[in-house]
Amino acid sequence: MPKKARPYSRYAKDAATLLGQLIRKARIDRRMTTEEFADRAGVSRGLLRRIENGDPGCALGAVFEAAAIAGVPLFNADERALNSALASNSAVMTLLPKSVHMPRKKPDDDF
Amino acid sequence: MPKKARPYSRYAKDAATLLGQLIRKARIDRRMTTEEFADRAGVSRGLLRRIENGDPGCALGAVFEAAAIAGVPLFNADERALNSALASNSAVMTLLPKSVHMPRKKPDDDF
DNA sequence: ATAATTTGGCCTATATATAGATCGAAATGA
DNA sequence: TCATTTCGATCTATATATAGGCCAAATTAT
């Protein structure tokens, strides 16, 4: 969200905060230090702290990777379910229109 | 995930891809153009495309915001449930140890 | 078929995220 | 209590994400 701080909705902020909390809780439950966990997730200690703090600026991939390491389920799904949902969803996408068109606007007259 | 491309786990990648698909599907179902939707979400059209494509580099906040606008539920929870989970979880966090200590290492002798 | 519109792909400039190091404070285990 | 370790915060340099504009191809509605 670079370029001018974006105002986040409460929903988005809460979701980010909750995910961060779940990750921290899982890390502590598994008795991993921030350094150990960060290494496994492939992020710096500083980034892990931001992730656990629910910083909306963190990269989606980094956060999801941390969730994966922590064992925090995304979309209430394990790897298998995720793949399955992905597959069936891809099939549905095929049937959807490729573009959304607004009612055409006549060059001249207006309603 | 700046600084050297990080290898994402399949789980993290799939989760990002799925979320993007769900957002795109919701947008099309609601008959919103990418421009219209991007405006509402407060992101550029380009970023929205990356979000829908499941690009792991997108900011967590931007993706979650898009999900919010699209009506894609995060953690199977609406705003209320999210707040509730956040609250109860915060309470639990209080009881957890503030730091995780490894078994202490003796200054001299090794096993 | 054809015109209007949407979309996807590039590009550039700029803001921002990230890594890595360091330091003091705090928490833990002995 | 006390020593060790972890944590949180700050700073710098660098890579990267983002916005915004433009154009061609694709898609849709008429």
Image (tube, coloured by chain):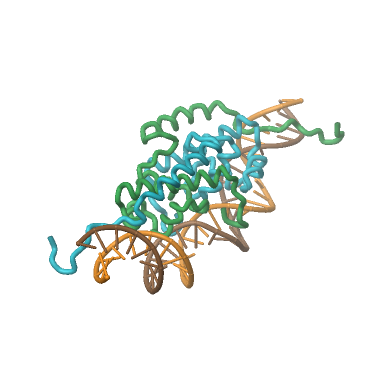
Chain colours: A cyan, B green, C orange, D brown
Q: Position of residue B76 (x, y in %)?
A: 42, 34
The picture quadrant where one finds residue D18 is bottom left
For the residue pair A49 and A84, the one nearer the viewer reads as: A84
Q: Position of residue B48 (x, y in %)?
A: 41, 55
The picture quadrant where one finds residue A34 is top right
In the rendered structure, the answer to whether residue B30 lies left or right of residue C12 reads left
What count of labels does the image hold? 0
For the residue pair C4 and D13, the one nearer the viewer reads as: C4
For the residue pair A34 and B85, the one nearer the viewer reads as: B85
Residue A49 visible here: no
Q: Quadrant of the C terminus of chain B?
A: top right
Q: Residue at x 58, y 35 (%)?
A: A71
Q: Position of residue B23 (x, y in %)?
A: 40, 47
Q: Is residue A82 above or below residue C11?
A: above
Q: Residue at x 33, y 58 (%)?
A: B35
Q: Is residue B78 above or below residue A109?
A: above
Residue A28 visible here: yes
Q: Residue at x 65, y 35 (%)?
A: A32
Q: Residue at x 61, y 29 (%)?
A: A29
In the rendered structure, the answer to whether residue A26 lies left or right of residue D25 reads right
For the residue pair A104 and B95, the one nearer the viewer reads as: A104
Q: Position of residue B2 (x, y in %)?
A: 57, 56
In the rendered structure, the answer to whether residue A49 lies left or right of residue B69 reads right
The picture quadrant where one finds residue A65 is top right
